[in-house]
Image (cartoon, rainbow, N blue to C red):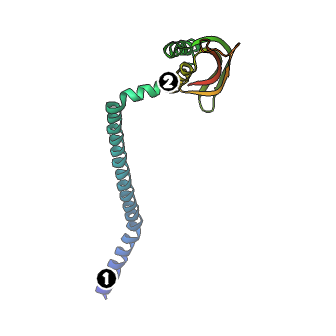
Amino acid sequence: MRSILAIIFLIGAILILLLVTWPEYRDLRTSMVEIEIRREERENLINHHQALDEISEKLLKNYKEKMTKLEDGIPDDHYAPSLFVELREISHRSGVRIGSLGDFSFREDEERGISEVEISLSVEGGYSNFKNFVSRLERSARIMNIKDISITRVGEIDVVRPMDYSLTFTAYSY
């Protein structure tokens, strides 16, 4: 009888021990799985940052000049005189003369963080020179959108007399 009582007591003690330790064991297993998941996430994040660093180095090495040109495309200032200096240089290189500046407006798009400067101006010169002027505006590092172009001829049609051109465009900055 004693041995049966000892066996029952032993089985009861084992059951009580299992009931007390089983939830702790499950928590331990869950914690170990979470730790493993976080370790993998950390390794993936480290690998991702290393890949980004490698890509950044390659971009700087291979495309540094193009990236600086892109940064020049949307300058961080909307300082109008710098834009006018650029327009003067483009007109000088293309062989047209800036006759007059018309309307000039400045607008900020706070949602996109971009400022727009809209300028109307008139230039004078031959048609091929004007085409060269527009082409240089399009190829400029500064991002510009030409909205309107009009051609007027003052006086009689004459090969020697230059034509007048009016254009409106928008330049962007941030």
Residue in the image at 49% along x and 24% along y: 140
> Quarter holding the C terminus?
top right
Residue 26 lies, with reference to residue 85, above or below; the image says below
Q: Which residue is mark 2?
A: 140
Expressed as whole percent of the image width and height from the top left, the position of residue 75 reads 51, 22
Name, please, the residue furthest toward the bottom.
1
Residue in the foreground of this view, choosing between 116 and 88: 88
Residue 164 position in % (x across, y down): 65, 16
Mark 1–mark 2 distance (CA, rounded to whole Å): 94 Å
**23 above or below 96?**
below
Q: Label 1 belongs to which residue? A: 7
Amino acid under disc 2: Ser
Q: Residues within 10 Å of mark 2 (few under 14, many from 20)?
A: some
Instruction: Identify the image quadrant of the N terminus.
Output: bottom left
- Residue 15 on image: x %, y %: 38, 75
Q: Nearer the viewer, residue 125 or 98?
A: 125
Amino acid type, label 1: Ile
Q: Where is 161 relative to 148, above or below?
A: above
Which disc is residue 30 wearing? none
